Image (spheres, grey):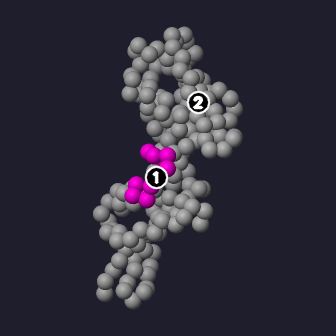
Amino acid sequence: MKLKNKAVVYHDYECQVSDDIKNEELTYHLEGLDMYLKPLGENNPRLNVLGRNSEKHYPNQIYVEAKGYVQGEQCAYLIHIDKETADVDSLNGLVTCLKRTFTHRNDYRVVIQEHLESGHSKVIEEITISCCDVEFPDEKHIQETIQEAVDGTYEINEFNLLPLGL
């Protein structure tokens, strides 16, 4: 009997994996910088993650604005920092991460099914993946992320990406 593994992919709007990844990334960038980060406005989902140093005098200020896809998804940050002594990579990473507060949130639930020639099938695993490195991942990017997630455990012969909203 021939086996064929199929991955059925659903967009998961309730999952928080991409938010957890973003919070870890934000914390990583904050650790390497001597700065004061001031969230502006009250509509800020990252307030509980933002580490703050004392509000001592820093010679430079960087304004960062984050916008989402709907009217209520917007906030801003003011970074007080000394650009001369700051780690450039950490600062650039922080700014990028803050700009993406409301975007780059692509979580997917993947059901891996084993199909027999006889028409019988069974679910062999369910996993959650997150594609938060691109704003709008295409099919190829999602497939590559799934292959990385299963890491050779299964040879997936077919992908079935269901349209959004199903």
Say whether residue 151 is visible.
Answer: yes
Q: Which residue is mark 2?
A: 65
Q: Residue furthest bottom?
A: 118
Q: Is residue 74 magenta?
A: no
Q: Amino acid at mark 1?
A: Pro
In what quadrant of the picture does the N terminus appear?
Answer: bottom left
Q: Amino acid at mark 2?
A: Glu
Judged left or right of residue 5, residue 51 is right
Residue 99 location in percent, x, y?
A: 53, 34
Q: Residues within 10 Å of mark 1 (few under 14, many from 20)?
A: some
Task: Write the residue at 46% across / 69% down.
Answer: 160
In what quadrant of the picture does the C terminus appear?
Answer: bottom right
Q: Name the element at disc 1.
A: loop
Residue 148 location in percent, x, y?
A: 35, 56
Task: Write the residue at 35% across / 77% down.
Answer: 4
Say whether residue 20 is visible.
Answer: no
Picture layout, residue 94 above or below residue 112: above
The foreground one among 115 and 164 is 164
Task: Write the residue at 46% across / 14% down.
Answer: 82
C-alpha separation, residue under disc 1 versus residue under disc 2? 23 Å
Judged left or right of residue 97, residue 73 is right
Residue 20 location in percent, x, y?
A: 51, 45
Question: In terms of secondary structure, what is the magenta stretch mainly?
Answer: loop
Checking the image for residue 137, the label placed there is: 1
The part of the image, by quadrant, that contains residue 55 is top right
Which stretch is magenta? Answer: 132-142
